[in-house]
Image (cartoon, rainbow, N blue to C red):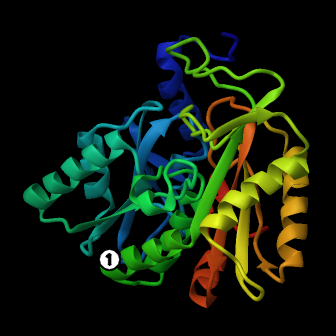
Amino acid sequence: MKKVINQPGNFVDEVMDGIIAAYGDRLHLLDGDRRVVLSSAPARAGKVGIVTGGGSGHLPVFLGYVGKGMLDGCAVGNVFASPSADRMAKTIKACDRGNGVLCLYGNYGGDNMNFNMACETVDLEDDIKTMTVRVKDDVASAPAEAAERRRGVAGMVYAFKVAGAAADEGRPLEAVAAVAQKALDNIRTIGIALSPCIVPDVGKPTFSIADNEVEIGMGIHGEPGIEVRPMTTADALTDAMLSKLLGDMPLAEGDTVSVMVNGLGATPKEELLIVYRHIHAVLGSMGVRLVMPHIGEFATSMEMAGLSVTLFKLDAELEALLRSPASSPFYTNENI
């Protein structure tokens, strides 16, 4: 294992120390707890809180989206591991302004269990009302008829953005949850992996793949995909991903979408732009309107080489919420 780290066991805490050192004017820790990050941005009185949580190793997901117009707080765990229910409960309590808190996070077993426990805790101990919306955008992780089992991947960034804008408008908890779910109902993602990553505490690759192969549908923790095929051109790979996405969420002439081409950690932005160029051509030829492209690293998997493509089908309400101003240390839509 060759990584720019100190002791593997200190990896997450030292990353958190670096984030606070760099962005301490915009973020702060909850009572010095390195695993709970809160926004320092002023918020209107009574605003619905929005929190998330998940394992480290995916920056900017999850805590990279804590900030103005997005998330109010985030609990993080060890690399690829859920944060504790206790930390999730503390995050919820810290982000409640009297009108409830939306828990918005990826559909993973540990996160589901711990957030459920946390919501029960704050309800019993503090009478805080919570609602839960789980991100399930990965079309490769389950077929459409079993969509409730799907994993949450890069599409959650769009959900954070929409929910954050709705909360900033002063919408009540039920309405914020409803529009977050509406967004997710119109979001689909699929990824490809070219190489594995190494979890520092483990010290070896999470999976293996030959140099001349690509895996379609690989999960962000190394979960098996749906197909391993010989490596091919960028356009052919893009067509394969678009085929899966459009088969699950068809688009028609006159539709509007935002496209995210997301690097998984070790893919140059130049390659992401080559993929977006082909998506733009294909969808444009269908009469689909493309707005606010997101191209870069939004949800990574340590140093995994590969990328994901997300399609977000927009109506007037969702487009307005996506365009609403937002700023965090790892995201701003001013240049999107």
Q: Is residue 8 above or below residue 153?
A: above
State the residue in front, 256 or 8: 256
Rendered-image quadrant of the C terminus: bottom right
Q: Is residue 123 above or below residue 207?
A: below
Give the image location of residue 83, x and y in percent: 35, 37
Q: Is residue 69 visible in this depiction of the protein?
A: yes
x then y, percent, for residue 77: 40, 34
Disc 1: CA contacts within 10 A as few (<14), some (14-19) or many (>=20): many
Does 12 sit above or below residue 133? above
164 lies left or right of 51: right
Quadrant in which the N terminus is drawn: top right
Q: Of residues 108 and 234, which is closer to you in this image?
A: 234
Q: Which residue in the structure is indicated by mark 1?
A: 173
Residue at horizontal 13 percent and vertical 61 percent from the top: 123
Percent x, y of residue 209: 71, 23
Is residue 35 toward the left or the right of residue 154 in the image? Answer: left
Where 170 sits versus 79, above or below? below
Residue at 45% of width from left, 37% of height from top? Answer: 55
On screen, residue 85 versus residue 57, left or right, reads left
Q: Circle 1 — which element?
A: helix
Answer yes or no: is residue 31 visible. no
**Residue drawn where x is 18% and y is 65% of the image:** 128
Amino acid at pointer 1: Leu
Which residue sits at x=49%, y=18%?
10
Instruction: Give the residue at the far left of this rendering.
Output: 124
In the rendered view, does 92 fall on the left or right side of 24? left
In the image shown, does 28 or 326 lie closer to the viewer?
326
Quarter of the image for residue 285 reads bottom right
